[in-house]
Image: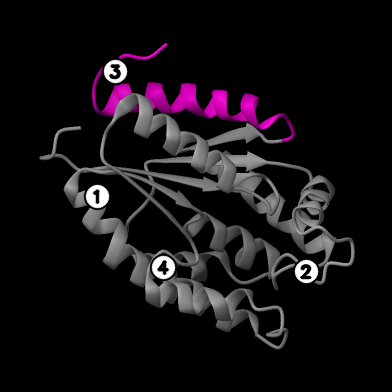
Amino acid sequence: MARDRRGIFITFEGPDGAGKTTQLRLLAQFIEQELQVPLVTTREPGGTPISDRIREILLNPQHKEMVSETEVLLYAASRAQHVNEKIVPALNRGDIILCDRFMDASIAYQGFGLGISVEKIIEINHFATGGVVPDRTYLLDLPEKVGKQRILKRNAGDDGADLDRIEQKELEYHKRVRFGFHQLAEMDRDRIVRVDANRPESEVHEEIRRDFLRFFQQNVGPVSSD
């Protein structure tokens, strides 16, 4: 990738258990092995030492008394540090950035999930990010019950004791979150690619890989790939 151009910012979104982290890892491996361009992988909440400390507060299941307004502001604070310390410098270098969650997650989880004003969340996060928006977003869509089963299997238990504060929320909350992601996908079809995640991970990866290659070629230039 030419070093005198802005980088490409790719995010992975979706309900809990949809396989975002796995698909991000698989795409990162493809980029590193086949495209050999500068790459940064990161996540939210987190991505920097300060943001990771905020993540610990946000996801700690002991913090059940956290009010919705605090949650919104903590996510935005973590994002502000992440954007300024990691994402913007990478974009300025011309890197590809793959990020596990970004602002869409706040709209879905705190807006639709908690019932906070979506307009207010957008306003707060626009301030936090300085207007940085992903170039492409892969929305991994999965039924709530399937996601819950995957999470429990991943944590090797059926009692939910090892789940984080968000994962422990009731099924109706996660239904609202998924609906929120669907609404976002409808409103921003040019950016958000909705992917059926209720399939083998190899099939999901192949769909994402093909779309990413098309997007990369349109924005950077031709590459050699099967």
First of labels 2, 1 by sequence position: 1
Give the Cα separation between the discs numbered 3 and 1: 20 Å
Among all residues in the image, which is located at the extreme bottom? 65
The quarter holding residue 172 reads bottom right
Residue 112 coordinates in the image, percent (x, y): 66, 61
Left or right: residue 122 compared with residue 173: left
Against 121, residue 20 (above or below) is above
Q: Position of residue 186 (x, y in %)?
A: 58, 39
Image location (x, y in percent) of residue 114: 68, 70
Q: What residue does disc 4 label? A: 79
Q: Mark 2 or 3 closer to N-term?
A: 2
Label 4 and label 2: CA atoms lie apart by 23 Å
Q: Is residue 155 visible?
A: yes
Label 4, label 3: how far apart the Cα atoms are: 32 Å
The residue stretch that appears in magenta: 198-226
- Circle 2 sits on which residue? 168
Q: Secondary structure at mark 2?
A: loop
Real-space Cα separation, disc 4 to disc 1, in angstroms: 15 Å
Structural crowding at the residue carrying mark 1, measured as other residues with C-alpha within 10 Å and reported as few (<14), some (14–19) or many (≥20): some
Q: Please state which amino acid type lies under the numbered disc 3.
A: Val
Residue at image coords 52%, 46%: 12
Q: CA distance from mark 2 to mark 1?
A: 35 Å
Count of marks, rendered view: 4
Q: Which residue is mark 1?
A: 91
